[in-house]
Image (cartoon, coloured by chain):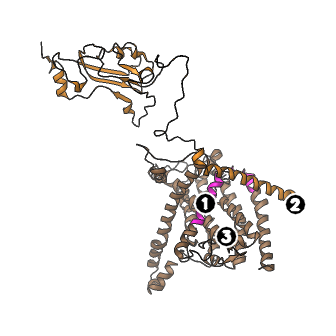
Chain colours: A orange, B brown
Amino acid sequence: MRAYLRTIWESVSTLVTGMTITWRHMVNIRKGNVTLQYPEERWPRPERDIGFDQDDYNVIRSRLHVDMDDCIGCLKCERVCPVDCIKIETEKVDKGEDIPDVGHTGITSNGTKKALLLTRFDIDMTECCYCNLCTYPCPEECIYMTGGPNSEKHPIDYEFSQFDRNDMVYRFAKEASEEQVEKATCVKNGEKKNG
Amino acid sequence: MIVDYLIDIIPFAADWPGLVFVSVVIFCAVPVFLFIAVYALVAIYGELKVSSFMQDKIGPMGQGVGLHAGKWGLLQPIADALKLILKEDIIPTTADRKLFILAPFIVFIGAFISMAALPFSQTIIVADMNIGIFYILAVSSLGVIGIILAGWSSNNKWSLYGAMRSAAQIVSYEIPAGLSIIGVVMITGTLSMQGIIEHQSGFVWGILPNWIIFQNPFTFLSFFLFFISGVAECNRTPFDIPEAESELVAGAFTEYSGMRYAFFFLSEYANMFVVSGVAAAAFLGGWRSPIPGVLDTPGWGIMWFIGKSMFLIFMMMWFRWTWPRLRVDQLMSVCWKGFIPIAFFNIFGIGIWKLLIG
């Protein structure tokens, strides 16, 4: 009889112990919560200590960004890309006209004269393998990984999650109407305007 | 009850059975069904949140573009229901088609008609039968037929195992549940639900409300026996060996999908409410206020009854997310070697208490 009652007491008390534990977790959910509401809350990025100042070397493999005002359309990045995720289309520019709206300011920040209008500059980040090869040949240093030494030009962006797969294709070329493109380029209806 | 009113008010109602039938459907069945549906949405949301909080998570949350679960994830149960309605209805080719289709309805009917005798307040009860509590015990075991049909007709070993376990479990746990109710019936001297609640008015031991659970130590024990047996009858964890997702996929419901599965799900939640409602009415004073005489009007009665039932449903969720599942032989030994002797002992004790103390 004693053993019988002790068994009952033991099972009841251990069950109640378990229930107090879950109760404590339930009422302390504000303190104990482990879920992050991702797009609104993020983990703090851990500090990086790799032996040298990371602002001096581009060791960050993040999102590619292009400063379109500096791009001269040399296609070096498109050619070097091992997975062909960069797609560039250019039009030849009329020497006389300068239309800032379409990203054609005539001269880049390095002083190079722009000879081409970029009608398309797409980087498909779903295909990108983050090899960083495209940033080295760029003569104007206008294509780069965000963050690191480039954080002044563009803050770091390594998550860039999207709800639609097509939104992962970043279109850097400034939208231009047909009129503007026609006005800025010397090709019109297949024949050259000035010569 | 409403039908009785109708027959009283309209003299020719009794002559037209068709009219009585239609009015029963409109005034009783539809509101009860709507109540079950709304309550199930609330309970599913509660279960999601309670389970998450107990596991240090925050459960369904909706914020930002594309995550449209509403504020605090309030729309999650509606989204779940919509998903179940829109899902493809699959019937396996080797299944026994007629029984497969019939099974979810039998399970749901078992839960649905039990609601008829639940006293929501002094006046709101579908039928105040003089055998109310006996009726609930009787029809709530109808569901086991549906579960066996589902398991057998699925033609699947998991389903059959689950159905057999479920049958054994429900039939076994009816006995301690029924024996605990016998104690209540001995004290109140009636089987009518309203009669049992009527008996629980006033105070006991000076300060406590005169609920049957507080009337003597044996009824206190009876309440826990009944409630735990009820949890077992609902196939809820820790007695969920018929479903046992880690062993039997989903037990008898393995082959069901879409709306048919939703009916099993709905009847599980409806059964939870029936068990909690009977426990609240028979042991916790039903629609009576915790402080006798305060807020004891019929309007508050609904709130007290549903509040007590929801508290017991929360207890079931608490059990579910705390305790591990019992093994099959443990389950049977708990029932036959543990609960049934204690239940008999309780009947004996209540009888002697009633004889000596009153």
How far apart are the alpha carbons under marks 3 and 2?
29 Å
Circle 1 SS class: helix
Question: Residue B230: x, y in percent?
Answer: 66, 62
Question: Which three-letter amino acid code belongs to the residue tagged 1?
Answer: Ile
Which residue type carries mark 3? Phe
Residue at numbered disc 1: B313
Q: Residues within 10 Å of mark 1 (few under 14, many from 20)?
A: many
Residue at 48% in and 50% down: B73
Q: Is residue B316 magenta?
A: yes
Residue visible at 71% across and 75% down in the picture: B206
User: In this view of the protein, which residue sits in the foreground, B75 or B18?
Assistant: B75
Which structural element holds mark 3? helix
Q: Chain of mark 1?
A: B
Asked if labels 3 and 2 share a chain, the reply is no
Question: How far from the left and from the top, in percent, is residue B355?
Answer: 80, 79
Residue B133 vs residue B98, the one in the foreground: B133
- Image side of residue B58 versus residue A18, left or right: left
Magenta residues?
B307-332
Name the subunit of mark 2: A
Closest to the observer, B132 or A89: A89
Separation of marks 1 and 2 at Cα, in angstroms: 34 Å
- Asked if one can make out residue B266 in the rendered structure from this viewpoint, the answer is yes
Q: Name the residue beneath numbered marker 3.
A: B283
SS class, disc 2: loop
Q: Main secondary structure of the magenta part?
A: helix
